[in-house]
Image (cartoon, coloured by chain):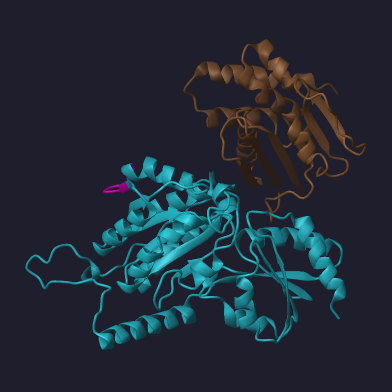
Chain colours: A brown, B cyan
Amino acid sequence: MIVKTIFSGFGGQGVLMMGISLANSAMSKGYHVTYLPAYGAEMRGGTANCTVAVGDEEIASPVASEPDYLIVMNLPSLFTFQNKVSAGGSIFINSSIIDARPNRQDVKTICVPCADMAQELGNNRVANIIMMGAFIKKSNVVSPDIYLKNLETIMGSRKKTLAEINRKAFAAGFDYIKD
Amino acid sequence: MNKVLMSGNNVIAEAAIRAGCRFYAGYPITPQNELTEYMAEHMRNAESGVFIQSESEVAAINMIAGAAATGVRVMTSSSSPGISLKQEGISSMAACELPGIIVNIMRGGPGLGNIRPSQGDYFQATRGGGHGDYRTIVIAPATGQELADLTMDAFDLADKYRTPVMILADGMMGQMMEPVIFKKPTPRQYPEKFMLRGAGTGKSKFIRGLLLDPIDSEEHNWKLARKYEVITKNETLHEEHRVDDADLVIVAYGTAARIAKGAIKRLRDHGMKVGLFRPITLWPFPELKLRALSAKVKDYLVFEMSTGQMLEDVRLALQGYANIEFHGRPGGAVPTPAELANVVAKIYDRKD
């Protein structure tokens, strides 16, 4: 089993952090992992994406021909990557700022208004963690507990409030998905 | 030692410090900045560690040459345009027989090119790069774990043959994170007679690359050539992946080899018997190993993220004994395994 996911959006939306936190969590569960970032020369406002491969066997190519999951945090990313997603795969959309929907019938579309939800929580910057909550619930790549534990390790325990808001954000995204 | 998830750039830096590298000089350039950054942060915690952000790439290579002459383990790193600037210094280190590690995290070229992964510096790395009759050992890792292991081994090779060693990776290897475990480095063996640390009451020592007498210089050149022959004989590394029953073999290194492995998985699922020959040392090139493989496999595809550079070494190795095709994506383009699989499938159907 190898699961490949592409996270994409603007630089500054925490797209790379989504990938790093997933890769770390999967590694801590003993999976083979690759995390491959790609970003423009500019830090904020440019495009950013990363590909995370998680597998119980050696991962040959860190590049995804046909990712199983695609997370798009901005509109350009949807256009760039929607055709790559494998048939039967899933596309997660930041529906707060993306009105367009995939023009494919053979993929599942999951809309999460994560930017609005982040605003409700009082911190715009946790939109990515809300999306991760929804993603983990749907994909089950790792358990929520493992993910949150690793997220805390990566973020460092400098600020207690940071861990708390991340937990809240994750729970909000996780609970948003009903089934 | 636990597994840690680290970017390739950080893995090289950490492995170097663990291997006893105590002098690093470098100048920033994407996509290798994380290596310099890691050294800035961690070299100060290493005993007698020195980190210098030099004023230029030229300064960095000359700084490590000077430090190497004093007997310290040294490293510098850069990306393609910066490596071009270092060539005079690398030639000088080869002439003076100074051990040191030069890391090239290749990006798209020529010129300033772009900051995406590429393999366009193969010629520069394997043919010497600078002026004069010399070679540098060139190691091309393809996984995070290899970056860790081979960086440590590179220091031993540099000491053993007293020659600069280049680690040739690309932006993808530098930026990609994979879990790694750092091995325990072997204790350094480097005779004190090669270290310039003040003569004291002993005999004076001299390290130089300027040999005005042509007969002396010729002798020095042949001495180096004999050394390179020994390296060629003893130090080639390569990997063969699923070649036993293969009808067609892809020859690729580094990142391209990773993509090739992904393509091979797809092709095998469709019943096509395809394998991989991956040179790990690019100089010395595993020429005899590849030639030996041509006794049973007659069709090859060289795949590089360039317009075809290693292709020449493959031709030299196979000497017309086998058919060679080529697929290249230069200038910072990174193909997917699916794309490569399509290319291979077409060739596979065509061959007799």
Instruction: Give the percent coordinates (x, y) of residue B328.
Output: 69, 64
Question: Between residues B307 and B229, which one lies in front from this camera angle?
Answer: B307
Q: Which residues are magenta?
A: B45-51
- For image coordinates 78% across by 19% down, the residue present is A176
Tell me the quarter of the image containing the C terminus of chain B: bottom right
From this view, report whether residue B336 is shown above or below residue A46: below
From this view, report whether residue B16 is shown above or below residue A41: below
Instruction: Give the percent coordinates (x, y) of residue B171.
Output: 57, 51
Horizontally, residue B145 falls left or right of residue B219, namely right
From this view, report whether residue B121 is shown above or below residue B7: below
Question: Between residues B211 and B199, which one lies in front from this camera angle?
Answer: B211
Residue at the left extreme?
B201
- For image coordinates 66% across by 19% down, the residue present is A169
Residue at the right extreme?
A105
Horizontally, residue B62 falls left or right of residue B177, namely left
Question: Between residues B24 and B156, which one lies in front from this camera angle?
Answer: B24
- For image coordinates 24% across by 84% down, the residue present is B213
Horizontally, residue B28 falls left or right of residue B300, namely left
Residue B270 within the magenta-colored segment of the rendering: no
